[in-house]
Amino acid sequence: MKFLFTFLMLIFSRSALAVPPKILVINVEGGWDPTMVFDYKGDITSIATDGGTLTTSSGLSWVSKSSRPSVDTFMTAEATKTIIVNGLYTKGIGAIDTIGQLGVAKQRTSEVYTDYMTWYASQVFPYLTIPHLLIDSPSVPGEFQGKSYHIKLDDVKRWASENLQVPASVSDWSTWAYENALSGKSGTNLDSTKISSLYLNQKRNLSLRPVFSGLYNPALSDFRNRASIALTSFKSNLTGVATIRHGKPDEWDTRAPGTAHFSEQNTLYESLFSDLTWLISEIVSGDLSENIVVVVRSNLGKNPMLNTQGGKNPWPYTSLLLWSKLWPGAKVIGQFDSNLFGVPMDPIFGSSGTGNKIYLTADNIFAAIFSRVSLSPSGFWLTPDPAMVLFQETTP
């Protein structure tokens, strides 16, 4: 088994990309309901689902419903470049690198969650002005375009706080201090910033005006304007990784009293996939599609059953979508069981394979991506098992 694993890794390394890709991360804040698109559960009566039909195109499967035509449009058109990961445990994927975002359900302040994207940016794009750009506004205000910043982080790990309260000793929490310093916010609550960036232990004096001046289209949604900032920063070779939010803060959190969970999630999914179709068109027309990875994720899943208010509470297993032309798509890996827990799987051969099976986490997914581009994650987190099944030609 060790020999086979070594052989596979050798193949992946030789086929790895000469130029590591830029990564665009889209975070769906508040938690989406994977059973509505990514993993069909309409035949399990113990799970509250919204119906729909299991649909397959070019090997990619998803839940189709007439109220979500944009899901079908995107999945059909982009099937060969899309990978769906189901049954993903949320530890490590809570959007700690998205400004003003709550972390993983049931997390504790004593736990540390790894900021994979910042680490990747620091390793691959240290020469760029802003290796990792975090975007929380549809426009870049003039006051930010002309300022010079000096931000220092001791490392690329971030502390998670359950209530978003800035600790009494801000100096002990370098990330919180950094975010508040750059945003110019004050008070005890970590407010959403207009725009922020990581400078990775180096001082850089710069003006963003030549890149971002006038980059705002009032006819576009906030998401599309945020995405335009990200794509412009890529084309300008300003940044290598960008993280943006879809919707308003915690908009996908359909659990409050009076929440109509299914109708709201339907509307949100329709909006998201319509935006994704637009985004891919912009990526292609901007000549970015040959060296980019789009990661669409949510920090939470949704409880199998409706709560007493007709919503769904947070759930610690979720789904993730990858889009890229850099490796074969048209596959679904991982799965949920009849209780919506993730099913352990072999990281090389898939759930039907042999050997040591694991619960998928962000560790496994990002370790696989980084290994695929010849960037060893060793030393950054403890002995990850790269989910190299992501890059097999077909799903086992």
Image (cartoon, grey):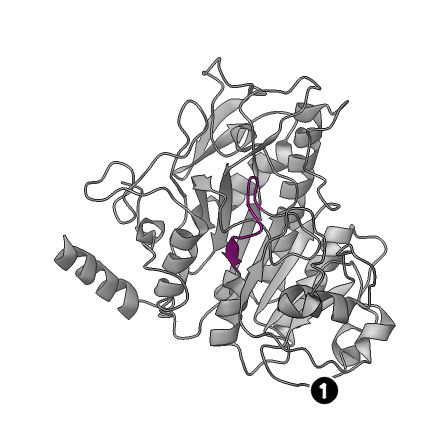
Main secondary structure along the magenta-highlighted residues:
loop
Residue 366: percent from left, percent from top: 43, 57
Using the rendered image of the protein, determine whether residue 289 is visible from the camera's viewpoint: no
- Reply yes or no: does residue 337 show up in magenta: no
Q: Residue at x 69, y 31 (%)?
A: 254
Q: Does 111 lie within the magenta span?
A: yes
The residue singled out by tag 1 in the image is 205
Tell me the residue at 50%/62% (across/down).
116
Where does the image place residue 13, in percent across and percent down from the top left?
29, 68
Residue 303 vertical placement versus 78 (above, below): above
Dot 1, crowdedness within 10 Å: few (<14), some or many (≥20)? few
Which secondary structure lies at badge 1? loop
Where does the magenta region start and end?
Answer: 104-114
Q: Nearer the viewer, residue 275 or 100?
A: 100
- Looking at this rendering, what residue extends furthest in the front direction? 168
Residue at the extreme top:
45
Q: Amino acid at mark 1?
A: Asn
